[in-house]
Amino acid sequence: MNKEVLAKIGKKLKEARNNIGLTQEEVAKAVNLNKGQISYYENATREITITALEKLANLYGYKLDYFLSNEDTTESQISIAFRADEVCGDDIKIVAFAEKFLNNLLDMKQLQGK
């Protein structure tokens, strides 16, 4: 992957994380990575695997192709806000599952023309 592509992915990852109000540490725990990896990906200092990108996309409520496209919108089609002062790892995983489920449901409805 070239540096320009890595930089675009990193920028989108950081914006998506900030949109849902999570720290790099909270994200790392939720997707079973370490905080350093999240930082590397966001700052485009290391290449991200498709597996890691998919985990982050699901957590943030975006489709994988958003991070790989030239699309510049910073809003997820579906956004579930974290409203609690203290959010634990299990809460983050549940919200990520819900966002993935809702994105899949939206895809199915679009395929059906509804």
Image (spheres, rainbow, N blue to C red):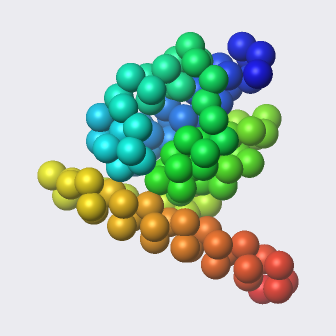
Which image quarter: residue 69?
top right
Rendered residue at 49%/20% (across/down): 40
| Residue 62 visible in the current orientation | yes
Q: In which quarter of the image is residue 112?
A: bottom right
Q: How many marks?
A: 0
Left/right placement of residue 111 relative to residue 82 reads right
Nearer-the-camera pick, 52 or 25: 52
Q: Quadrant of residue 96?
A: bottom left
| Vertical arrangement, residue 5 with respect to residue 68, above or below | above
Which quadrant, please, contains the C terminus? bottom right
Residue in the foreground of this view, choosing between 79 and 103: 103
- The residue closer to the viewer here, 76 or 25, is 25
Residue at the (67%, 22%) spot, across then down:
6
On the rendered image, what quadrant is the N terminus found in? top right
Q: Residue at x 51, y 25 (%)?
A: 42
Above/below status of 89 relative to 3 = below
Q: Residue furthest left?
A: 86
Residue 27 visible within the image? no
Q: Position of residue 101 (x, y in %)?
A: 55, 73
Residue 47 screen position, x and y as percent: 63, 23
Judge whether 7 appears above or below 52 on screen.
above
Residue 5 position in % (x across, y down): 74, 23
